[in-house]
Image (cartoon, rainbow, N blue to C red):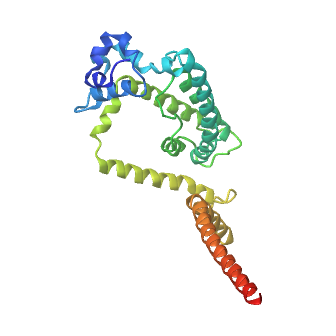
């Protein structure tokens, strides 16, 4: 195993010439430091294939296949690695299911289409590998924007009229992401200033809010609900927010009340016992 101080001073070009030493590096620590120090620091360096070669850039892009399938692990680590990966996959499926359904509601498409897309995405990422501590899934930004490619007021029970355009849009986005990853275009994110990030997040939150307002419409008249129906909906939303925000604080409050009640009960019991002892002594 190479030492960490040597890895920090090394460059990608040096290890490309020595692939046997590059494969010895730990993916989660040393290899990340190597790429971070050489590619991301001090300057924006895009078009990585022109620096290390197109074939080597492609191999580095799909390098997750080696360690993702456990080919770089020792025989002792293999069983533990596969057990952890299977458990993580099961947990990821459970977490993606409600998220996918909510995004389908935002995008105004049938939930079974979202299930098919999520399963296909998970299959591709599991075959070709990914990055450590990174979960792949559909973003809310894409779900809120892709509804514009569909016909308004579509029937959820049937296929929307513009579903073919949505498939083409998703395919084009996938090709663009592939080329962005291959040519290392993510380095251009350093050119975007902080106010633009803040404005993007604010605009995205407004888009999320507008995309969910259709739940407040009557499905028959397509008008916003009024009266006691609206009041009931507001009460439910308020309860959901309070439960999410205050659920973690409930155990702390219970523990504090429990400690105070214990102290009061102990004080009362001690006072009663002392009073009984004094009475017994006086009687004797």
Residue 51, visible in the rendered structure: yes
**Residue furthest toward the left?**
42
Depth check: give the residue in front, 49 or 105. 49
Residue 238, visible in the rendered structure: no
Residue 127, picture quadrant: top right
Depth check: give the residue in front, 85 or 259. 259
43 left or right of 242 in image: left
**Residue furthest toward the front?**
284
Residue at image location 58% in from the left, 63% down from the top: 242
Residue 217, picture quadrant: bottom right
User: Looking at the picture, does residue 37 appear above or below residue 258?
Assistant: above
Image location of residue 270, percent across then percent down? 66, 77
Residue at image location 73% in from the left, 83% down from the top: 276
User: Looking at the picture, does residue 130 appear above or below residue 235?
Assistant: above
Image location of residue 232, percent across then percent down? 67, 68
User: Looking at the picture, does residue 268 appear above or below residue 202?
Assistant: below
Image location of residue 145, percent across then percent down? 49, 44
Depth check: give the residue in front, 79 or 90. 79
**Mark count:** 0
Image location of residue 240, percent across then percent down? 61, 60
Q: Quadrant of the C terminus?
A: bottom right
Depth check: give the residue in front, 143 or 12. 12
């Amino acid at each position: 195993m190479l030492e960490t101080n040597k890895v920090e001073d090394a460059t990608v070009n040096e290890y490309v010439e020595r692939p046997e030493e590059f494969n010895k590096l730990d993916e989660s620590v040393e290899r990340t430091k190597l790429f971070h120090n050489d590619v991301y620091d001090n300057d924006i360096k895009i078009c990585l294939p022109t620096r290390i070669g197109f074939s080597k850039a492609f191999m580095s892009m799909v390098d997750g296949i080696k360690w993702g399938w456990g080919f770089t692990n020792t025989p002792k680590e293999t069983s533990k690695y596969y057990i952890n990966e299977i458990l993580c996959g099961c947990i990821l499926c459970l977490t993606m299911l409600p998220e996918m359904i909510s995004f389908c509601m935002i995008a105004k498409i049938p939930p079974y289409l979202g299930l098919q897309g999520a399963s296909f995405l998970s299959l591709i990422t599991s075959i070709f590998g990914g990055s450590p501590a990174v979960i792949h899934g559909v973003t809310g930004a894409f779900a809120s924007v892709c509804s514009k490619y569909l016909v308004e007021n579509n029937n959820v029970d049937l296929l929307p009229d513009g579903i073919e355009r949505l498939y083409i849009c998703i395919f084009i986005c996938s090709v663009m992401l592939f080329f962005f990853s291959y040519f290392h275009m993510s380095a251009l994110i350093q050119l975007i200033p902080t106010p633009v990030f803040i404005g993007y997040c604010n605009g995205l939150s407004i888009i999320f809010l507008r995309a969910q307002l259709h739940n407040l419409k009557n499905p028959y008249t397509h008008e916003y609900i009024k009266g006691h129906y609206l009041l009931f909906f507001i009460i439910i939303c308020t309860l959901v927010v309070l439960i999410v925000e205050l659920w973690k604080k409930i155990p702390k409050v219970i523990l504090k009340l429990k400690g105070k009640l214990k102290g009061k009960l102990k004080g009362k019991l001690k006072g009663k016992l002392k009073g009984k002892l004094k009475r017994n002594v006086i009687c004797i």
